[in-house]
């Protein structure tokens, strides 16, 4: 039975003011806790478990994860309205924000029209939820990782067929979105993966004119930083030190090609 | 957006000053000013002008390789014209401000450039002949002696330049500072020369005022006539800025770097129109290129400040010098007008050494007579209310009432102690103040504005302490007054549980929560109310100006200082242990993790700055990752615009990485040039004592 919208609660592990890399203008980013993916390069390990957990470090321990009701979270975000309403807005990140789709949808409904909403997603969600959430968002940042299905399963723990279907839906129906490719040495920045991304964009995307561009996200060498605090070990299945094969020109041309199609 | 780079000549001059090569021309000689003054039996004003005269006479002109703007000090020491005993005697029954000598004000540099220095003699001599009287006679003689000494030294520089074939320098020195400046070069040379002469006369914290305003006509004229390009203008600005760092080691200050060479750009003009110009941009570029701690750059913002100027300012913040410091015209100007400054003058404000608002040429305010300790007032009120055996009838509002009275008492005590401050005559400074020689006497007898500024220190700690007491003792009744007092007296030695509650579970300033912020605002209201009683203080001093700065009081109020009037307080109810520093100016209490910069700005925007206008910045520490991309630097510019929009008054942004600071502490030899903002000023990290280094490291660990 679906809960009444008023009673819905969501688990948030951080609300960051003055978020710098999550969209245009002055923004607050809400980090929703819980994620279906197990990316081996994940740098927000406290975002994975869908329950509150303690993070322990030299400076003491703190509880990551706090339940908000829809009105509580919307109220909190509206307290920033004067700050965010001009050029900025609210970003939802995670974890995977769609992991708490009902809560996300209700919260976004409240914000809609008053604050610019940006969604950062892996695309790993039920098609129906994905459609509902992207219809409410003003902009989407869509993570594109490994195109090869077997490799995708190996490095993220899930299949990417549904993810790519969601991406095609987004491409048809909007809103404006950017693709974001984390450059994981030897995993996402291989020649094969570059070619796969290129072909996918060429063959499947830019149907509705919503594709705005593609960002390469350099590998974050501090990715493993928070694992100890959540009682886990960071064991990436790739060589962290390996030089990435960044070729921005390649991607520029991919996007340009795609946009000119 | 154009970016003005500096040329090789400037880089060489910069490196030479950084290496201290110019110090080779210094001589180990102290002019016998005291002997001569005693022998001649001079009175006080004539001793002051004699000091300027002898310092100038003893100087040897030095023109260093590559220099176009000249003057290098060769006599490092500025001797006193009275013996220590005589000096003490002169102040018998009067209060002395700092070293006694006039400091921390700003000349009317525009007037110097427009009229030249020689004209000041004509003004005072005409007036003396016209009206007579002993006082004017002395003023006329002392101004003449001081001005003549500066002009004669300029003459010797001209001769020296001729001798070595530096004809452009010779030509410039023939024109200024004697007469009006006719070119950008003459203007900046005149400024450079006379600014140095003030330092040599014993004055310190010699302000530079609204540089992009008074220099603008000369820059514009030269570029329009084709005499200079904008790059040429930038070159002179850079050379001037480099030269301001030559004598940092000679300047008295609490710690090295505290030089008070504040320079203001931006804001509105005297008519209220936006006055940003190309020089405003050049100042930011040049400061970033030379990377020195002087001059201290301040930027006035208005709703019209162009975003690309804010962007350039953010780029300057990025390199970690701790400036620009931002002031918000929309808040400062009404505040000053409310304090009795004429609107046109209020629009012309600059800042003193740290942040205290000051009108160049017109302000003889003593902007820092002392500090009110908010944490002491809070602590006193809690103790007073809880001292009865069973303080059952106590309400929180009575605690606030005791607080109000204590703040009033602190203000009264400071004003009482300082209202008879005696300032020594300052003929050269008098000659450089607006309408001073025309309508008033020596600047020591007062300028157009004569207010006494008071810092308001430890405000966040005090608000947090009171908010915690309200929550635990009153609202929740979970902590008995006796338990709280015992924990404070024993420095939380046996009550970790309470310490943790106070630190972690109480409302904190900086989170945009009214529970703490309303108390913060009220504390400042009490402070303003106590100051507003003085209308005027007395015949000599006008108003008491309350501010939100702390200067060194964030340390002194916690640890004490010899001879300090202000009360020291031990452990406080915000969960701060005895001896720990308070937060500096307007910042969340030390060690408090707050939600973020939006909340910090929102919290501090609640203070009624129309009544609290001595200055004192919100201090935000930004992590260096903030400056990773052009896009994120742009967000820093947006944050500054937000600070203005929210109605905050003043702000410092600082950036550094904790790793770099920690490494600098361990290996100072590798980080000699590492600059940090200390409170009102920037200095070299490795020159700070360990406790300040630790304080700064701790501050940065909580950076956004």
Image: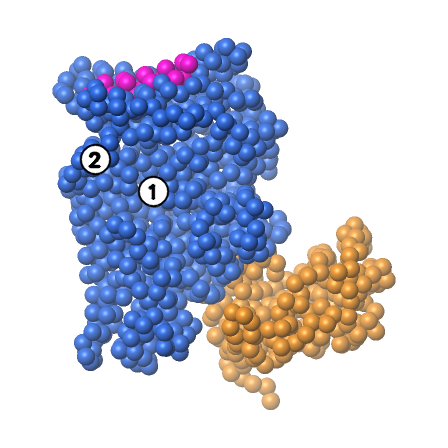
Chain colours: A orange, B blue
- Which chain hosts label 1? B
Residue at numbered disc 1: B357
**x, y percentage for residue B530?**
21, 54
Is residue B563 shown above or below A137? above
Q: Which mark is residue A234?
A: none
**For residue B139, which quarter of the picture?**
top left
Residue at numbered disc 2: B85
Q: Is residue B152 magenta?
A: yes
**For residue A113, which quarter of the picture?**
bottom right
The boundaries of the magenta stretch are: B138-156
Q: Is residue B325 magenta?
A: no
In the image, taking residue B17 as reference, residue B147 lies left or right, namely left
Q: Depth check: give the residue in front, B128 or B152.
A: B152
Measured in 3D between alpha carbons, the distance from the residue under mark 2 to the one under mark 1, in whole angstroms, is 34 Å
In the image, taking residue B681 as reference, residue B530 lies left or right, namely left
Tell me the quarter of the image containing the N terminus of chain B. Answer: top right
- Which chain hosts label 2? B
Give the residue drawn at x 24%, y 65%. Answer: B380
Q: How many marks?
A: 2
Give the residue drawn at x 43%, y 55%. Answer: B691
**x, y percentage for residue B231?**
58, 27
Residue B402 visible? The answer is yes
Is residue B358 shown above or below B202? below
Give the residue drawn at x 23%, y 40%. Answer: B96
**x, y percentage for residue B393?**
19, 78
Question: Callout 2: helix, strand or loop?
Answer: helix
């Amino acid at each position: 039975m679906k809960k009444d919208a008023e009673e819905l609660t969501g688990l948030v592990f951080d609300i960051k003011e003055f978020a710098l890399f999550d969209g245009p203008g002055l923004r607050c980013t809400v980090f929703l806790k819980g994620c279906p993916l197990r990316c081996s390069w994940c740098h927000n390990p406290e975002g994975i478990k869908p329950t509150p957990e303690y993070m322990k470090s030299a400076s003491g321990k703190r509880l990551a994860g706090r339940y908000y009701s829809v009105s509580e979270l919307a109220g909190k975000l509206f307290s920033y309205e004067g700050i965010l309403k001009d050029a900025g807005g609210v970003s939802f990140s995670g974890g995977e924000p769609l992991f708490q789709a009902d809560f996300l949808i209700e919260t976004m409904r409240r914000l809609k029209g008053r604050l610019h909403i940006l969604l950062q997603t892996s695309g790993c969600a039920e098609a129906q939820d994905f459609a509902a959430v992207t219809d409410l968002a003003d902009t989407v940042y869509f993570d594109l990782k490994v195109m090869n299905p077997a490799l995708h399963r190996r490095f993220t723990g899930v299949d990417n067929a549904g993810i790519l279907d969601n991406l095609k839906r987004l491409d048809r129906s909007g809103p404006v979105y950017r693709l974001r490719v984390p450059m994981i040495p030897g995993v996402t920045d291989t020649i094969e993966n570059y070619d796969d991304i290129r072909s996918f964009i060429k063959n499947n995307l830019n149907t509705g004119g919503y594709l705005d561009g593609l960002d390469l996200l350099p590998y974050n060498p501090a990715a493993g930083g928070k694992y100890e605090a959540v009682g886990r070990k960071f064991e990436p299945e790739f060589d962290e030190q390996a030089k990435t094969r960044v070729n921005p020109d390649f991607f520029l041309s991919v996007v340009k090609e795609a946009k000119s199609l | 957006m154009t970016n003005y780079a500096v040329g090789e000549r400037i880089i060489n001059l910069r490196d030479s000053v950084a290496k201290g090569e110019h110090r080779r021309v210094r001589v180990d000689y102290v002019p016998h000013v005291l002997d001569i003054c005693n022998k001649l039996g001079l009175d006080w004003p004539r001793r002051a002008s004699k000091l300027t005269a002898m310092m100038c006479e003893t100087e040897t002109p030095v023109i260093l390789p590559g220099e176009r703007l000249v003057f290098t000090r060769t006599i490092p020491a500025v001797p006193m014209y009275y013996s220590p005993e005589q000096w003490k005697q002169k102040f018998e029954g009067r209060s002395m401000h700092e070293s006694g000598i006039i400091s921390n004000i700003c000349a009317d540099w525009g007037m110097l450039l427009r009229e030249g220095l020689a004209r000041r003699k004509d003004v005072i001599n005409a007036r003396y002949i016209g009206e007579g009287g002993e006082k004017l006679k002395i003023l006329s003689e002392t101004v003449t002696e001081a001005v003549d000494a500066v002009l004669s030294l300029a003459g010797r520089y001209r001769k020296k330049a001729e001798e070595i074939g530096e004809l452009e320098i010779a030509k410039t020195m023939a024109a200024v500072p004697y007469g009006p400046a006719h070119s950008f070069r003459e203007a900046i040379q005149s400024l450079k020369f006379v600014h140095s002469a003030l330092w040599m006369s014993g004055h310190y914290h010699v302000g530079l005022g609204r540089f992009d305003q008074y220099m603008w006509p000369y820059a514009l004229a030269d570029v329009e006539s084709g005499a200079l390009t904008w790059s040429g203008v930038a070159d002179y600005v850079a050379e001037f800025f480099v030269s301001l760092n030559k004598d940092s080691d000679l300047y008295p200050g609490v710690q090295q770097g505290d030089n008070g060479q504040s320079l203001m750009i931006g804001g509105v003009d005297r008519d209220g129109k936006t006055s940003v110009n190309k020089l405003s941009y050049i100042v930011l570029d040049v400061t970033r290129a030379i990377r020195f701690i002087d001059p201290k750059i301040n930027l006035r913002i208005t709703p019209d400040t162009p975003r690309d100027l804010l962007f350039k300012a953010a780029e300057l913040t990025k390199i970690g010098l701790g400036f620009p410091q931002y002031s918000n015209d929309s808040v400062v100007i009404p505040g000053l007008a409310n304090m009795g400054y004429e609107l046109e003058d209020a629009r012309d404000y600059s800042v003193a050494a740290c942040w205290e608002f000051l009108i160049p040429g017109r302000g003889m305010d003593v902007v820092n007579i002392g500090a009110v300790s908010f944490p002491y007032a809070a602590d006193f009120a809690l103790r007073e209310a809880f001292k009865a055996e069973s303080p059952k009838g106590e309400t929180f509002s009575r605690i606030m009432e005791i607080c109000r009275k204590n703040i009033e008492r602190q203000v009264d005590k400071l004003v009482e102690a300082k209202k008879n401050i005696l300032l020594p005559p300052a003929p050269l400074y008098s000659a450089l103040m607006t309408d001073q020689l025309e309508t008033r006497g020596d600047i020591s007898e007062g300028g157009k504005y004569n207010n006494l500024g008071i810092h308001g220190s430890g405000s966040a700690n005090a608000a947090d302490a009171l908010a915690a007491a309200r929550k635990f003792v009153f609202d929740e009744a979970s902590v008995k007054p006796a338990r709280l007092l015992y924990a404070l007296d024993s420095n939380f030695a046996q009550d970790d549980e309470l310490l943790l509650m106070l630190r972690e579970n109480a409302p904190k300033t900086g989170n945009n929560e009214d529970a703490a912020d309303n108390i913060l605002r009220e504390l400042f209201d009490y402070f303003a109310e106590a100051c507003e009683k003085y209308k005027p203080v007395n015949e000599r001093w006008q108003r008491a100006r309350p501010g939100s700065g702390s200067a060194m009081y964030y340390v002194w109020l916690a640890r004490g200082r010899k001879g300090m009037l202000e009360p020291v307080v031990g452990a406080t109810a915000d969960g701060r242990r005895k001896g720990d520093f308070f937060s500096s100016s307007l910042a969340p209490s030390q060690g408090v993790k707050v939600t973020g910069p939006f909340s910090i700005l929102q919290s501090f925007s609640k203070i009624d700055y129309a009544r609290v206008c001595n200055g004192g910045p919100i201090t935000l520490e930004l992590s260096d990752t903030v400056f990773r991309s052009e896009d994120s630097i742009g967000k820093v510019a947006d944050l500054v615009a937000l600070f203005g929009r929210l109605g905050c008054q003043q702000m410092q942004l600082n950036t550094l990485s904790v790793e770099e600071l920690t490494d600098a502490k361990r290996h100072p030899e590798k980080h000699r040039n590492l600059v940090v903002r200390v409170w009102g000023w920037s200095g070299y990290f490795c020159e700070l004592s360990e406790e300040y280094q630790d304080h700064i490291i701790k501050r940065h660990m909580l950076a956004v």
